[in-house]
Each structure stands twice: as structure tokens, then as C-alpha cells.
Image (cartoon, grey):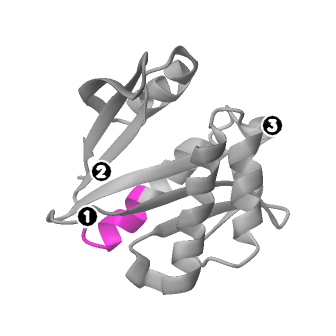
Amino acid sequence: MNTSADIAMRHRIEPEDRDRVRQIVESTAMFRPDEVGVAVELVDERLAKGEASGYHFAFAERAGEVAGYACFGPIACTIASFDLYWIAVAPDLQGRGLGRRLVEEAERQIRALGGQRVYIDTSGRPQYEPTRRFYERCGYAVQAVLPEFYAPGDDRVIFFKRLG
């Protein structure tokens, strides 16, 4: 099945996205409950404050259902630097290019917002190895590793990419 052909991207946020984001993030089985709460909190911030929240989204929809999403925004006190805070794809659609499409769409929007650099933080735990390889395949490079940042044995791995 060609997932790319039946995926539509949207950028506007809807109240229903709160539950959709929660479902996708929980379904990946990668995140602790407090992390899931943060993902939903960013949706709430955007719904409440609009663009002033500093959070931007790209939603990938398949047959009208959210199949994945990315959340990103400018980094305070920087010039043209952005964080890619979240990217999550429903498990049954992983490995089919949807994650890459979401990263590319986020980068396109970041450029349109004047962004020139993107940073991504992720875990150093072994279960995140596929995630780290994914970021490398998308052109990101590890710039720093902060030992035991998230918890004992859980490093913070910081990726970087300069947008051309």
C-alpha cells in the first residue's frame, strides 16, 4: 500500500486534535504518562492562544483520521532557531514514509516562518535507537549528549539540522 498517496496534510488545529494527539502518542508505547500529558498540553496551548502560543502543528490525515503529527516552534531568545518538539505516527503506519513527510512538512513551515535551524531532543534509551536513526536519515546530526538528563540511564540526545 502506498501510504503517501492517501495522506493529506493540514495545519489548522481543531478541538478534536486534543484526543487525536493523545491516542497517537499513547499508541506508540514510547512515552510515559507525563510525556503524553505534555503532548496534549501543547495542543491546549495552541487552541487557547493561537499563534501567540508559539506552537505550530502539521497533521497527516488518512481517510479523515489523524495518522500522525508534528509539533514545532521557535526557540525563545534565539534568531531563526526552532525546536521540533514532537513527531508521532500511528504504529500501523510507521515505516511507510509518513514520519519523513511530517518532518519535511515541519521544515517547510519552519522555513516559511523564517526559521533556519532545527533542533530535536530525544532519549538515549535503547528503545529510541530507531528514532535516532530516523532523524539521521532525515539529515539531522547529533550535536550533544547530556548524560542521565531525563532519568538515571536516560540521556538527552540533541540533534541539529541547518535548513538550506
Cβ atoms under marks 3 and 1 closer than 8 Å: no
**Image coords of residue 84 (percent x, y):** 41, 52
Label ID, residue 13 = none
Looking at the rendered image, the quarter that the N terminus falls into is top right
| Residue 72 showing in the rendered view | yes
Magenta segment's dominant SS is helix
Image position of 23 (left or right of 68): right
| Residue 58 showing in the rendered view | no
Image position of 84 (left or right of 14): left
Cβ atoms under marks 1 and 2 closer than 8 Å: yes
For the residue labelled by badge 2, is the local secondary structure a helix, a strand or a loop? Answer: strand
Residue with the mark numbered 3: 92
Q: Residue at x 16, y 65 (%)?
A: 77
Q: Which badge, 3 or 1, comes first in the chain's sequence?
A: 3
**Image coords of residue 73 (percent x, y):** 37, 64
Q: Amino acid at mark 2?
A: Val
Q: Amino acid at mark 1?
A: Gly
Label ID, residue 118 = 2
For the residue labelled by badge 1, is the local secondary structure a helix, a strand or a loop? Answer: loop
Numbered range of the magenta stretch: 107-114
Q: Residue at x 69, y 78 (%)?
A: 14
- Spatial CA span between label 3 and label 1: 32 Å
